[in-house]
Image (cartoon, coloured by chain):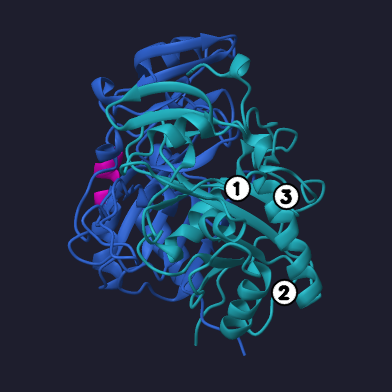
Chain colours: A cyan, B blue
Amino acid sequence: MDVKPDLAVFGIPDIPEIETGAPLADIIGDAITRRLTRLRDHDIVVVTHKIVSKAEGRFAVTRDGSVASLVESEASAILRRRGDLTITRTRHGYICANAGVDRSNVPGDRVVLLPVHPDRSAASLRDAMVRRFEVDVSVVVTDTFGRAWRRGLVDVAIGIAGLPALIDHRNQADHTGRIMEVTEIAIIDEIAAAADLVMGKATMVPVAVVRGLRLEPPTVGNGKATDLVRSPAEDFFL
Amino acid sequence: MDVKPDLAVFGIPDIPEIETGAPLADIIGDAITRRLTRLRDHDIVVVTHKIVSKAEGRFAVTRDGSVASLVESEASAILRRRGDLTITRTRHGYICANAGVDRSNVPGDRVVLLPVHPDRSAASLRDAMVRRFEVDVSVVVTDTFGRAWRRGLVDVAIGIAGLPALIDHRNQADHTGRIMEVTEIAIIDEIAAAADLVMGKATMVPVAVVRGLRLEPPTVGNGKATDLVRSPAEDFFL
């Protein structure tokens, strides 16, 4: 007999290639129905931004195979440059390689850009999921970012709806009764990372459902993924 | 009827306060037995470093409530300083606040330091789990780190045994047939983040078991968490 896990992550497969104007919420909802029959209250639907961008028509065409001019036009600031790699600030405030311009999993000479307003994209998908499944769920839109200091990429949240970006334990006591100091946890980035463990990169599993995470008041409610953007004045490493 | 998830995360509760010399592998093994009866091949046992450090006697005592002198002695380099916050490089090469000196969840005036060799600590725990449960499992030892550019902390891996630090998709084709460019995924940090979703910070759940992740050859095998350390020469942001 299987023991019930505290957290369960379901990959949602069989989502077709998405083109501009595709009814993404319906497509995701249908795929969730096939895999899980229904969603439950507190479920978190995690969606790689790639299919959001594609549905929103955020395609561009490279010139001679180079993304350099697209990176320039997508970035709000260029922070570092070395060879083909440019570290940029996006218009949303995120710091990532090549302003999010991405040529993987795109047929032809096209590349995919980041959604213009990923938090709004998440809110729109959430509204559709709540209507369709008649439960209270949240949505996290993800991208795959590099980090300072640590090799390797991880998935992070770039758009959310229905949950906070940060969980603030600062006023809670630890188990010894001492009030904890700095313990704002970037819960949406941990959710994105957990979902990536079932989504992978080379496969066609661009959606996952995370089940079992119960956020307690007062941390429930609506945040924005851009709440994670640290202002340049507060950042040590720019 | 419940649909089987692709990834399941189990919190392992009821681990008592750990003191120097405690038989940590036995304590964790007993708690896993209570929660799950047994481990299975490919399970990943995720352990917050705090209980590893405590079992290894990595306690220190603060002077007048200040950790400043401990941070100086634990760090191999001081990168930035502002008020009470010091960003350091540890002797392992990790970049984090206060060289990992941590006063939360420690009774009295004591603080907990990072394990001296977290990869070795993970290897020792793994050997014990493999012997006890007679299955092939891996171990990830975690800490909670801040990041450049993004607000909030996330759990990351500081010691591993039985799995690679990075999954390298660089020679794989994406679903359009194009060879992917830079897609080394820091899988152990994603595992640490997923586990933290059930471990929390104020609770006594310092261990989790992640079940369902199948790493394909040639990515299986032994890595070190320090494989994630980017050399200063390669890092844009120091």
Residue A10 in the image: state x and y as whole percent. 53, 72
> Which class describes the residues within 10 Å of circle 1: few (<14), some (14-19), or many (20+)?
many
The mark that comes first in sequence, 1 or 3, is 1
Q: Amino acid at mark 3?
A: Arg
From the viewer's perspective, is the residue at label 3 or at label 2 nearer?
3
Residue stretch in magenta: B118-123
In the picture of the structure, the residue carrying the numbered disc 1 is A115
| Residue for point 55% across, 45% down | A114
| Residue for point 50% across, 10% down | B81
Secondary-structure class at tag 2: loop
Tell whether label 2 touches label 1 (CB within 8 Å). no
From the viewer's perspective, is the residue at label 1 or at label 2 nearer?
1
Label 1 and label 2 in one chain: yes
The mark that comes first in sequence, 1 or 2, is 2
In the picture of the structure, the residue carrying the numbered disc 3 is A120
Q: CA distance from mark 1 to mark 2?
A: 27 Å
Magenta span: predominant SS is helix
Q: Is residue B114 magenta?
A: no
In the picture of the structure, the residue carrying the numbered disc 2 is A40
Q: Is residue A159 left or right of residue B125?
A: right
Q: Is residue A224 left or right of residue A109?
A: right
Task: State which chain disc 2 sits on.
Answer: A
Label 1 and label 3 in one chain: yes
Question: Is B53 situated above or below A129?
Answer: above
Residue B119 in the image: state x and y as whole percent. 27, 42
Question: Is A8 situated above or below B223?
Answer: below
> Which class describes the residues within 10 Å of circle 2: few (<14), some (14-19), or many (20+)?
some
Secondary-structure class at tag 3: helix
Task: State which chain disc 1 sits on.
Answer: A
In the foreground, A102 or A163: A102
Task: State which chain disc 3 sits on.
Answer: A
Q: Amino acid at mark 1?
A: Pro
